[in-house]
Image (spheres, rainbow, N blue to C red):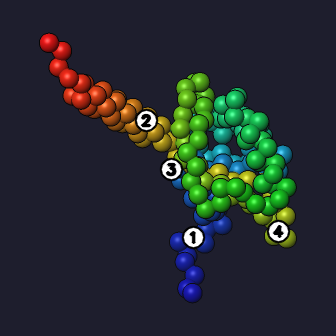
Amino acid sequence: MQPNHEFDNANFNLLQAIVEQAPDAIIFADREGAIRVWNRGAETIFGYAAAEVLGGSLDVIIPEHLRRAHWEGFRRAVDTGQTKYTGRVLTTRSVHKDGSKLYVDLSFGLVRKGAGAIAGALAVGRDCTARHLAEAALRTHVAELEEKKKVGSNEDSQPPHY
């Protein structure tokens, strides 16, 4: 493999640049759940600048009613070294800095140190609020049409009233 001198600059960290400039949210929380990585994608989706959340809790983006389940799953994953959603994308509720509700497609992973010990958890996500709301509206519309069809067919089966 030939060296690529374009990336040899000691002042340029390719991996850091990829994480920072990725359009999707990339979030890493250490074993205690403190946010240690929060990229521009996360800033865009959730509304918080990295300086506002680094070192703080993931609770800033987790709706209050989901926090207990989140932390139980987080602790179980960190303690066992396995995530329930490995290899899957989970659509979950989240909250923006302004308080608005979001739906986010997230994939999760555990980050291991060189010796294999769990350093923390990684989430990569993108805002899917518009898609989720459009799909919900479509499901509601289909259900309404099916109900009208059912009511209409019941009326058709009734004898006429003279």
Residue drawn at point x = 85 percent, y = 64 percent: 117
Q: Amino acid at mark 2?
A: Ala
Is residue 33 visible in the rendered structure shown here?
A: no
Task: Please say if the residues under marks 4 and 3 sit with CB atoms less than 8 Å apart.
Answer: no
Q: CA distance from mark 2 to mark 1?
A: 46 Å
Does residue 124 sit above or below 49 in this rendering?
below
Q: CA distance from mark 1 to mark 4?
A: 28 Å
Horizontally, residue 22 falls left or right of residue 80, namely: left
Q: CA distance from mark 1 to mark 3?
A: 21 Å
What is the number of callouts on the image? 4
Q: Which residue is mark 3?
A: 23
Residue drawn at point x = 80 percent, y = 61 percent: 81
Element at label 4: loop
Task: Please say if the residues under marks 2 and 3 sit with CB atoms less than 8 Å apart.
Answer: no
Closer to the chain start, of discs 2 and 3, is 3
Q: Nearer the viewer, mark 1 or mark 3?
A: 3
Residue 139 x, y percent position in the rendering? 39, 37
Q: Which residue is mark 4?
A: 116
Q: Quadrant of residue 89?
A: bottom right
Q: Which residue is mark 1?
A: 7
Q: Which mark is residue 136?
A: 2
Pointer 4 local density, CA inside 10 Å: few below 14, some 14–19, many at least 20: few
